[in-house]
Image (tube, grey):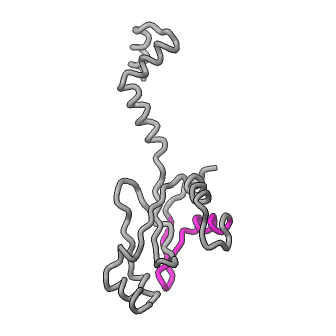
Amino acid sequence: MIKQLEPAEIIRDQYGFWTHPVFSKYLECVIGDSEGMTSEQFEELKLHFNVDFSKVEMEFDAPEDVAERYWDQEELEAVAYWNPSKPKGDGDWFLVSINDTEDGPVAWWAKPKNTIDKQVNLMDQFIESGEFDKTLNDFFGLPESVVQSLKEVS
């Protein structure tokens, strides 16, 4: 069952970490104490919440002074001064997690999949290309006047 993941209020801890509460609950149920998830679990996660994900790494995104505090001075609290950039491209990206990994802090962003929009666009292209008329005529053997009437109604 698809449960559209939606933005949540972001309240970061003293170190700057945070995880979306619904996302966190799902991860606890699915991966439990594991340190990571399989690619199959990740695909299921995307399907379950009807989202696409994008990862932003602090190493390549944070201002130099913040990165220096984290890596050179080993100051974990520096993460709280990092405001992760939204991924480039279209979509209503929202934050689902800022967490530490063995490679450093990362921010996970999500955006709803626009499956309905894609289906409508495909249908529009199908109609505009003339394939809709051809299919109606081939399948139903409808006279051109009936096909034209159906186009006017739709």
Taking the spot 38% from the left edge, 31% from the top edge, the residue there is 125
Instruction: For the C terminus, give its image quadrant.
Output: top left
Q: Is residue 37 above or below residue 50?
A: below
- Residue situated in front as seen by the camera: 99 or 20: 99
Taking the spot 44% from the left edge, 90% from the top edge, the residue there is 75
**Which quadrant would residue 91 be assigned to in this image?**
bottom left
Residue at the limit of the structure toward the left, as seen here? 64
Give percent across and percent down for residue 121.
41, 36
Q: Is residue 14 above or below residue 113?
A: below
- Residue situated in front as seen by the camera: 60 or 21: 60
Total numbered badges shown on the rendered structure:
0
Taking the spot 50% from the left edge, 70% from the top edge, the residue there is 97
Q: Please give left or right for residue 4 compared with residue 114 in the image.
A: right
Q: Is residue 39 magenta?
A: no
Q: Is residue 28 magenta?
A: yes
Give percent across and percent down for residue 31.
66, 67
Taking the spot 61% from the left edge, 57% from the top edge, the residue there is 40
Q: Which residues are magenta?
A: 8-29
Give percent across and percent down for residue 57.
42, 72
Q: Is residue 133 above or below residue 79?
A: above
